[in-house]
Amino acid sequence: MNLRQCRYIVEIAQNDLNISKVAAALHTSQPGISKQVRILEIELGLDIFVRAGNRLSGVTADGERIVAYARRVLEEIQNIESVARERRQPNIGTLVIATTHTQARYVLPEVMKLFANYHPKVKLILRHGNPEQITNMVASGEADIGVTTDAPPDKGSVIVVPWRQFDRVVIVPRRHKLLQQTRLTLKSIAQYPLITYEPQFTGRRELIRAFEKEGLNPTLSVSAIDADVIKTCVEQSLGIAVLSEVTFNSNKDAGLRAIPAKHLFAPSITSLLINRKRHLQKYVYDFIQMCSPSWSKSSLQSPPVSTGA
């Protein structure tokens, strides 16, 4: 068994058993991957994958365990390489941040500027995705840090570090009737079509739950993954929106108004996602502490506490 075979079976499992996709990503041939996987199975004396003719249709029970072990092997190899790289060039490298468009546009620029001044030789890369994709990128090592308001509970290697909290506001066109109300209510908001995030975003689900608790069923007219797109739709009178206060700028959003709504909706909490099993370069911890000074390197590296659940 060799590292190349480990990488092949892990990539196949992570890419829905699509060997063609894996071959393209690893710049090799599909027959070559299939051959190496079969050689590995013969060496081990068991099948890792279930086959239907010439296609892979699943992962065997033994295969699930082997893929998990292979993934851990690759993670540790990556950690070894990271330690060596940090020793050779402690202040040179790449910091990959997986995040949403909204966080990249409104929350990250300030700390990215500070980080760039402090670490001018570290290249910053932003990779956009929905909350599930962000979590997966951190878990797989594709990203060093995740930044999202849709953070999952601490699970396995991925831990959640709360960073910033923002209240919710209702975004409406200027001169909208809701601006005449002295105190906003869910019932008054539900009279108008709502422009929301797409279903995979927690913000949308929380919004719907707030209305459902009051027995209200507002019309969801448009959905998007970007706060800027949502605001543009509001400006075009396609509906109104409930967004984090950080997304509204009275100078830049001259055609819109923001009505405080913290008495109606839970705040939006931006969190960092970190893989505690990965060796992170010192400059990654510097970025984390620039965001959340109360979190130390030792607290992030300590093993999770069992809750007995």
Image (tube, grey):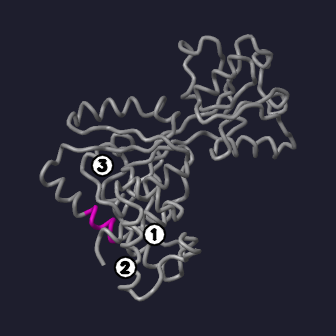
Q: CA distance from mark 3 to mark 1?
A: 21 Å
Quadrant position of the N terminus in the picture: bottom left
Which residue is disc 1 drawn over?
Answer: 305
Residue toward you, 37 or 82: 37
Q: Secondary structure at mark 3?
A: helix
Quadrant of res 39: bottom left
Q: Earlier in the sequence, mark 3 or mark 2?
A: 2
Which residue shows up at 80% across the image and 28% down it?
193
Marks 3 and 2 sit apart, C-alpha to C-alpha, by 38 Å
Vertical relation: 277 (above or below) 281: below
Q: Earlier in the sequence, mark 3 or mark 1?
A: 3
Task: Write down the quadrant of residue 308 in the picture.
Answer: bottom right
Residue 134 in percent (x, y) is at 49, 49
Between residues 280 and 293, which one lies in front from this camera angle?
A: 280
Residue 175 falls left or right of residue 294:
right
In what quadrant of the picture does the C terminus appear? bottom right
Local SS, label 2: helix
Crowd tier of the residue under label 3, counting other residues whose Cα lies within 10 Å: few below 14, some 14–19, many 20 or above: some
Residue 214: x percent and y percent? 84, 42
Kind of residue indicated by mark 3: Tyr
User: Closer to the camera: disc 2 or disc 1?
Assistant: 2
Q: Neighbour class for label 1 at 10 Å: few (<14), some, many (≥20)?
A: few
Provide the residue span drawn in magenta.
Answer: 73-79
Residue 36: percent from the left, percent from the top? 36, 73
Report the residue at 22% width, 64% height from top.
80
Give whichever of discs 2 and 1 has the lower sequence position: 2
- Assign a secondary structure to mark 1: loop
User: Residue most toward the left?
Assistant: 88
Residue carrying label 2: 40
> Badge 3 is on which residue?
285
